Amino acid sequence: MTHETPKNGLHLPTLAIAGFRGIQELAIGRLGRVTLLTGNNGVGKTTVLEAVRVFAARGRQSTLSSLLRDRDEYAAEADDDDDKIRALDFAALFFGRSPSRKRISIGPVAIAHQLTIEEVALTEEQLSLVEGLIPELPSDGTIRSLLSRFEGTKQILPFFSMDAGSSADGRYTRAQAHAARVLGRAMGAEKSPPEIRCRSLGPGVLEDDKIAKWWNDVALTPDEDKVVDALRLVVNGVERAAVVTGHTGHRRRRNRVIVRFKGDPAPVPLKSLGDGAVRLFGVALALANSRHGFLVIDEAENGIHHSLQERFWRMVLQTAEANNVQVLATTHSRDCTKGFARAAAGYEPIDGALARINRQNGEVWAVEYPEKDMLIAAEQGIEVR
């Protein structure tokens, strides 16, 4: 189940993050329909995108686990009758890498609408319940729990803290999903709040399986034509696109995108047209699949030639507005920033926002550019990287 906002509403008109990963505190006073974040490597731009994903998921365990797996953040392994248990390091989600006496908060600046996550102690009765639900856990560890709260609702997330060979404090492995649901009911937790649809694109090209899934969701709809139109920004003469399934060695199935050009009956693989074509196709496809939700894009400039940046951002702005999608993206590229500012200036009814993330001596803050100053800053070469 997903939550929807009214037409043209923003889920996050502002953003405040505290206690999450390397961000002790950060506030951005205005987000737009499309917001571009700039800044040097290591300042926390990607962390902001991850925070939006956690907020959209309302702190669900599956999203927290996915973020850790994406970064290979595992604690030590434990043996249990020769069966390896590889523990996700949930402490890595907390500022200072320890959840003890710390709290994560993510959401709009208005505190009443923020999501919070913190560690809580379990009672003996609750511990016995989890132990009964997860009998395969090693005996030399501790069962712990995280509690997420959002607008009066709460979710209980039990985890296993391993003692052997590692620091026990904050070292978790994910418990079985049904254990979290049962424990939540036992603790009187309310029904989980509906999450907001959120699609995520990393710096690399979109995986074939994800392309196939998202394509199936828009096939034979008007969104299919919009995705192909976006592809024409970098490839002239494209008539149609499709996802086909074939077999590789060892009978493995593989999905791939093919495109057909006008006047040429033989289709060609999308990947043969270059990374730019694949990137544009992926962004357009993600926008079509993010209706009434979020799309976060890390290193948005990747694969897009500098001469196409303004047209690329024009497509993103127009599609985001039409589909009621709120987009947050990061970049290291001055050309990307210029293209975004020019596109946003050309579509004044569509709200674009630009902010530079800075870090010094552990402190993180945002420099926000008012709409009237975005184009001037980009054109005059003011440092936005």
Image: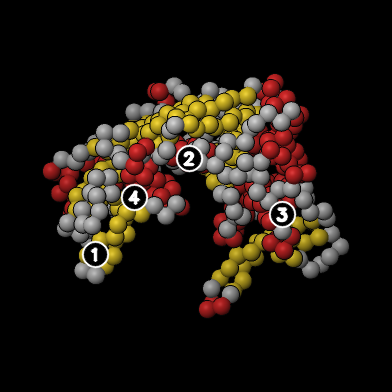
Q: Is residue 29 above or below residue 51?
A: above
Q: Is residue 204 above or below residue 117?
A: below
The image shows residue 108 at horizontal and vertical percentages of 47, 26
- Residue named by callout 2: 47
The reply to whether discs 3 and 1 touch (Cβ–Cβ < 8 Å) is no
Please tell me which of labels 2 and 1 falls first in the chain: 2
Q: Is residue 267 above or below residue 59?
A: below
| Secondary structure found at label 4 | loop
The image shows residue 193 at horizontal and vertical percentages of 39, 36
Please tell me which of labels 3 and 1 falls first in the chain: 1
User: What's the residue at 33%, 44% (across, down)?
Assistant: 91
Marker disc for residue 89:
4
- Residue named by callout 1: 79
Per the model, the C-alpha gap separating discs 2 and 1 is 33 Å
Q: What's the residue type where badge 2 is placed?
A: Thr
- Residue 217 in view of the camera: yes
Please tell me which of labels 3 and 2 falls first in the chain: 2
- Residue 319 in view of the camera: no
Marker disc for residue 277:
3
Closest to the observer: 61 or 195?
61
Q: Tell me the quarter of the image containing the C terminus.
A: top right
